[in-house]
Amino acid sequence: MQPNNSLVIETHNLSKAYKGVQALQDFNLKLTPGILGLLGPNGAGKSTLMRMLATITTPTTGTILWNGRDVVKDPEPLRSVLGYLPQDFGVYPNLSAQEFLEYMAAIKGMSGNKARQKISALLDLVNLRDAARRPLGGYSGGMRQRVGIAQALLNDPQLLIVDEPTVGLDPEERVRFRNLLSDLSGERIVILSTHIVSDVESTATDIAIIHKGHLKVRAHPEQLLKQMDGCVWEWMATSQELPALKQQFLISGTMRRMDGIEVRVASEARPCPEAKQVTPNLEDVYLSMVAQRNGGPV
C-alpha cells in the first residue's frame, strides 16, 4: 500500500519540565508515514515525548501540530485516530481479554458489530484466541502486553505510538510484532520507543536518538551505519584482559568462545594489532553516540 503522505505530525520547540527538571527541551521533529525508531537511555525523555504526542501531557512550551492543527488547543482530531501503548500499560484483572477489548472499543466510540469484528481479528493477530475468555489477572506479562498491542490497534489508528512494546514477549512473539509493525507502517505514522536496539534495526525506516531531553540525531539507518564504517573492530581476548579493555574502549559486544572472549569495540583507530574491522550494526552506532555524549571512550 502506498504511504498516505497527507498525514503529518510535527513538534516545534517542544519543551517539558517537571518540578524544575527539564525532561525535554527545544525538540523539533516532523514525521510522515513510516516507522520512527526512538532510541535513548533511561531518563532521556522518550516517554515524555510520547505522552505529549498522545495528548496525555501538555508541553511546558512549544507546539504539536497534527495535519497543521494545534494538538494542545484541539486534541480531538488526533485522539480519534490515535493508537497508544504506554510502557506502564495496565489491565483490569477481573475482565477477560474479550471484555477488556470491548470496553476499550466502547471508549473509542466503536459500534457493536464493527467492534466485535475488529476484536475477533485482533485476537487472532496477537495470538490470544484460545485465552480470550480467561481473566486478565491470570495472564503472563507477555500475554498482557499482547492485549495492550491489540487495544492500540482497535480503531485502525493513523498515528500509532508504542513504548517498549516487546517487553515480556518471547522471541517468536517479538518477530511477529516486528512483522506487524512493518505491515502497518505503509499507511500510518508509527513511533516505536524501545531499549531493544534490534527491534528498531529490523523495523525502523527512520531513527531518532534522544539524550538528556535533546534530539541528537535523526537519520535513516543506512546513514547512521555509514558513519560507523571502518570504526568497529573484533579480536580475541582473555577473561583476565576484559576488565582493563572495558576501561579503555567502548565495548559493544562480547561472546565467549572456546579459545577466549571475542570482543567487539567501537573505535576510530585500530585498538590493537590483532583487531580486525567488521561491519557495524545499529547497536555499535547507538552505544558510540551515547558514550560520546557522556564523555566516555570513543
Image: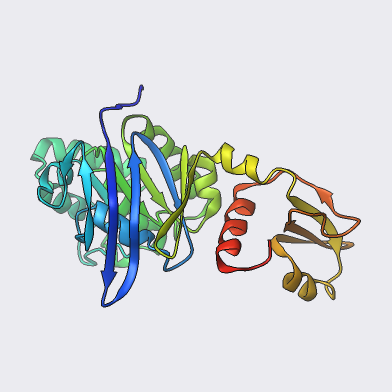
* Count of numbered circles on the image: 0
Confirm whether residue 87 shows in the render: no
Picture residue at 11% right of the left edge, 41% below the top:
110
Q: Dividing the picture into quarters, in which one does residue 43 lie?
A: bottom left
Confirm whether residue 61 shows in the render: yes
**Quarter containing the N terminus:** top left
Q: Going by the image, does 238 lie left or right of 187?
A: right
Question: Can you give x and y, in whole percent of width and height, for residue 177 in the image?
Answer: 43, 45
Decide which of 176, 60 is in the foreground and name it.
Answer: 60
Question: Can you give x and y, in whole percent of width and height, for residue 199 in the image?
Answer: 51, 48
In the image, residue 90 sits, relative to residue 162, either above or below, namely below
Q: Dividing the picture into quarters, in which one does residue 138 lie?
A: bottom left
Decide which of 126, 7 is in the foreground and name it.
Answer: 7
Q: Going by the image, does 35 lie left or right of 289?
A: left
Picture residue at 41% right of the left edge, 59% below the top:
214
In the image, residue 113 sits, relative to residue 257, either above or below, namely above
Question: Can you give x and y, in whole percent of width and height, for residue 246 in the image?
Answer: 73, 71
**Quarter containing the C terminus:** bottom right
Q: Going by the image, does 29 lie left or right of 41?
A: left
Picture residue at 64% right of the left edge, 40% below the top:
226
Name, please, the residue furthest toward the top: 2
Decide which of 36, 209 is in the foreground and name it.
Answer: 209
Decide which of 102, 78 is in the foreground and name it.
Answer: 78
In the image, residue 209 sits, relative to residue 42, either above or below, namely above
Question: Can you give x and y, in whole percent of width and height, for residue 172 in the image?
Answer: 52, 48
